[in-house]
Image (spheres, rainbow, N blue to C red):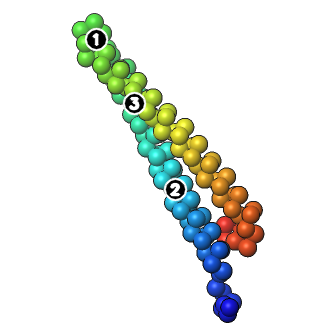
Amino acid sequence: MSMEANELPKLDEVILGEIQVLLAEKRTALSALRTGIAVFALPLSVLSALIATSRYYSMEKVMPLLAPLLLLNLGLVVLGCWLVFRSIHRIHHFEHRIRELSQKYRSIAQFIE
């Protein structure tokens, strides 16, 4: 079995491919984290605008419109929190898996660190 000096064995190629997939999944989790933060910030900005303009309207008169808006904002806050926490959990999972692979296969650890 002849191999060139810079050619990796088949097993190392498979492990590097798995690490590439894990890193791609980590990037996806990071984008979900970014989306979760944006979804979480939207209700805060809407409520800030409502508080800033509160002197121009009466709460009793706009309550039929305000109640559904506050309910929608609550839903967006819950969705944003869920996205953030789920993304953080997934990022930790991928980091742990990559660390496991680099410890198990020392020959590819130099490419990961």
Mark 1 residue type: Met
Q: Residues within 10 Å of mark 1 (few under 14, many from 20)?
A: few
- The one nearer the camera, 54 or 81, is 81
On residue 25, which mark appears? 2
Q: Examine the image and state in which quarter residue 35 appears.
A: top left
Q: Earlier in the sequence, mark 3 or mark 2?
A: 2
SS under mark 2:
helix
Q: Picture coordinates of residue 111 (x, y %)?
A: 67, 71
On residue 30, which mark appears? none
Of tags 3 and 1, the one toward the viewer is: 3
On residue 76, which mark appears? 3
Residue beneath the point at 41% across and 37% down: 39
Disc 3 vs disc 2: Cβ atoms closer than 8 Å? no
SS under mark 1:
helix
SS under mark 3:
helix
Cα distance between the residues tagged 2 and 1: 44 Å
Mark 3 residue type: Leu
Left or right placement of residue 100 versus residue 36 in this view? right
Of tags 3 and 2, the one toward the viewer is: 2
Of tags 2 and 1, the one toward the viewer is: 2
On the rendered image, what quadrant is the C terminus found in? Answer: bottom right
Left or right placement of residue 57 versus residue 36 in this view? left
Disc 3 vs disc 1: Cβ atoms closer than 8 Å? no
Can residue 78 be seen in the rendering of this structure?
A: yes
On the rendered image, what quadrant is the N terminus found in? Answer: bottom right
Vertical side of 15 occupied by 88: above or below:
above
Residue that badge 1 annotates: 63
Residue beneath the point at 58% across and 65% down: 18
Q: Earlier in the sequence, mark 2 or mark 1?
A: 2
Residue beneath the point at 39% across and 27% down: 75
